[in-house]
Image (cartoon, rainbow, N blue to C red):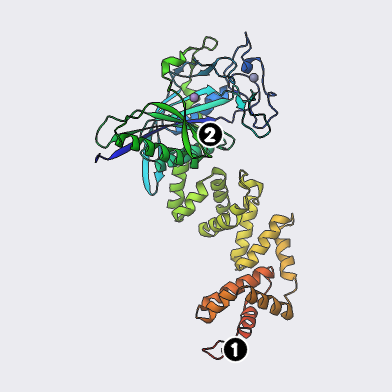
Amino acid sequence: MNSILQAIIGLEVHAQLTTQSKIFCSCGSEFGAPPNTQVCPVCLGLPGALPVLNRQAVAMAIKMGLATRCQIATTTIFVRKNYFYPDLPKGYQISQYEQPLCRQGLIEFEVGNERKAIAIQRIHLEEDAGKSIHQEDWLPPDQTLIDLNRCGVALLEIVSEPQLRSPQEAVAYLKMLRQMLTYLGICDGNMEQGHLRCDANISLAVVGQAQASSRTEIKNLNSFRGVARALTYEIERQRESIEAGRPVAPATLLWDAQKNIAVPMRSKETSPDYRYFPEPDLVPLQIDVAWCDALRQQLPELPLARRDRLLREYGLPQAVADQLTAEKAVADYFEAVLAQCPRPKLVSNWIIQELLPRIPAQQAIGSVAPAPVDMAEFLNLVIEKQLSRPVAKEIFNQMLRSSDSLQAIYQSFCQAPAVAAADLESIVRELMDQNPEAVRAYLAGKCQLIHFFIGQALAATAGRADPQQVEQIFLANLPETEFSGGREKS
Ligand code: ZN
Ligand code: MN
C-alpha cells in the first residue's frame, strides 16, 4: 500500500479537582489517608443516602470551561452511568452525558515552534470510583483489597476532538492542559498519584480520505512518557495491520508500562451499554450568568499568554520564558522580584540556575526561596557591589541558611580574613592536580581555561581568594612542556 496513513488521536483526560470535600458528600479527599477512612453513607452508596452537589467543584469546572473558551451551559443535569465494578459500590457512577457543563472550547499550545489549536468537545463533572489493590508484593497473588477513599472524589473530564496527529502533539496538548489546570489552581497535576489520568483513542486514515480504521482506546495512561510510548506503539500496530490487509478490530487496551505493550482489556463498550439515565436524586443545575462572570474575573493570566508577555516585555530567550512560566508560582516569583530589581536577565538567571535546582520535586518555590523582597535586595547588592559569581553564591548560600539580615551577612563576609598565601598556594596546586586535562589544554593554547581555575579557587575559598593571586600561583606551577622548554613564569 503506497498511500500515506495519518494518525487520528483524541484524548479524554480525568483531572482530580482540589476541592476540600468530595463532589456529593462532605468527606475529605486527601491523598494517602489510611484505606476506607474517608467514607460515609453517601459515597459508600448505602440505601437512602442522598447526594448534595459541591458548589466549589462546579466553580472549578466553570473556570476550566472559561479558560478553554467553552460555552457554559445555563442548565445542566447529572446522570447515572451504570456498570458493575468491585470498587464502585453504588453500581453506577454519577456523571454528565447529554448536557455537559461546558462544550465546544479550544486549547492552544505549541509543538516545537508551531502553534496548534485543538478543539475541546466537552468538559464535564463526575465522581471517581474506589481503588482495587492487587498484584502487590505484600499481597498473596489471589487476593484483592478495596480502598473506597477515592469513591466520590470530584473529577473533571476533558474530552478533545480527535484532532491530534502524532504522539508529540498529544504530549504537548496534555502538558498544556496540565499547565492550565495548575494555573487555575483546580488540580495539582500530580500524574504519579493519579490526579491526572489520560485515555487515548486512536485510528488511522489515508491522508485526504475521511474513512478511518476502527478506533481503539488505550486506558489509564499516567505519565507523559507513557502517553508517547503507548501512542507510538498503537499507531505502529494499526499501520502493520492495515498494510497487511487485516482490518483493525475495535478494542479497549490497557498500557503495560513495564513491558511497553498494550494488552486487550475487554471488547469496546458502546454508550447504550451504560444505560445512562438522569440522576433522580439531583435536581437540574441552573448556572447563574452573574456567577459565571464573577468566576471569569478570577481567572489568572493563562500560561501561553503569560509566556508571550514575558518574551515581549522583558526580551528573554524563549527557553527562559518557558521555564519561568512552566509553573505559575515561579512566574509570580519572577515578576515579584523584578518589581524591585528591574533586571530581567539577572533575575531570571538566578532563579533558573540557582533557585530552581534547589527546589525538591513536587515542592513549591516558596518552600526554599527567600521572600521576593529579600531576593531583590540580594540581587541589588550583587549589582551595586559588582560581586563576582562565586562571592555572590557564597552570600546567597549564607542567606538561605541563616535568619540574619542580608546587610549583616555581607558585612561579616567583608570582615572575614583573606585566605593566607600558603593556603591559597596549596588549594591552587591541588586544583591543578585534580584537573590535568584542563592544565594540558591550557598549555596547548586554551588560555581562557584560567577562568575555570579562578572560578574553582573562588568556590573553594567561599569567594575570598584574590583572582590575580590565583593566576600567579597557577602560572608559577605549570609543568614544563617539551615544545616551549618551559614557559615564561610571572
Ligand atoms: Zn462520603
Ligand atoms: Mn469519565
Q: Position of residue 245 (x, y in %)?
A: 29, 33
Observer-nearest of 272 and 52: 272
Tag 1 residue: 489
Which quadrant: the C terminus?
bottom right
Secondary structure under the numbered disc 2 in the rendered image: strand
Rendered image quadrant of residue 384: bottom right
Mark 1 close to ligand 2, CB under 8 Å: no
Position of 455 with respect to 74 (left or right) is: right
Most foreground residue, 224 or 21: 224
Alpha-carbon span between mark 2 and mark 1: 64 Å
Q: Residue at x 37, y 30 (%)?
A: 161
The residue that label 2 is drawn on is 196
Q: Who comes first in sequence, dot 2 or dot 1?
A: 2
Q: Position of residue 143 (x, y in %)?
A: 65, 25
Q: Is residue 330 visible?
A: yes
- Type of amino acid at the residue the image marks with label 2: Leu
Residue 454 image point, x, y percent: 61, 74
- Give whichever of 216, 363 is nearer the camera: 216
